[in-house]
Amino acid sequence: MPMTPAGTIRYWAAAKAAAGTAQEPYRAATLAEALEQVRSRHDGRPRLARVLGYCSFLVDGRPVGGRDHASVHLAEGGTVEVLPPFAGG
């Protein structure tokens, strides 16, 4: 039976403030699973759940865009970047 991939979730800007941390580990096969773990782990931080609703995500440097998060597979040692909208441009 294959191991579930483990990696790092990195939070930026408002997501970092809402999570109360800059990064934390994941052990999940898909982005949807990793985000569900984040919501569960931080259930005392409802602001984080709201922020995640409008963030964009990079998985190993590649934008997720509008893809279903359940279809975005995570790799062992991978990185998920949680990016809220940034002001300016």
Image (spheres, rainbow, N blue to C red):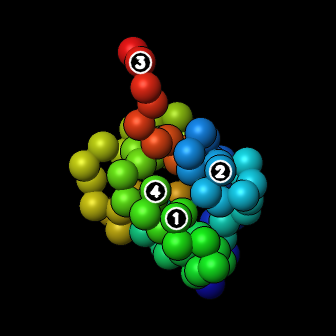
Camera-nearest residue between 18 and 5: 18
Would you say the residues marked 1 and 4 are in contact, meaning their CB atoms lie under 8 Å apart?
A: yes
79 above or below 87? below
User: Residue 24's spot in the image, x, y percent?
Assistant: 73, 59
Distance of mark 1 from mark 4, alpha carbons?
Answer: 6 Å
User: Residue 23's spot in the image, x, y percent?
Assistant: 73, 52
Circle nearer the N terminus (4, 2): 2
Q: Which secondary structure, mark 4?
A: helix
Which residue is disc 2 drawn over?
17
- Identify residue type, mark 3: Gly
Question: Which numbered marker is on residue 47?
Answer: 1
Camera-nearest residue between 3 and 61: 61
User: Residue 54's spot in the image, x, y percent?
Assistant: 36, 52
Give the crowd class for mark 1: few <14, some 14-19, many >=20 residues within 10 Å.
some
Give the crowd class for mark 4: few <14, some 14-19, many >=20 residues within 10 Å.
some
Would you say the residues marked 3 and 1 are in contact, meaning their CB atoms lie under 8 Å apart?
A: no
- Identify residue type, mark 4: Val
Residue occupying the point 56% across, 45% down: 14
40 above or below 6? below
- Identify residue type, mark 2: Ala
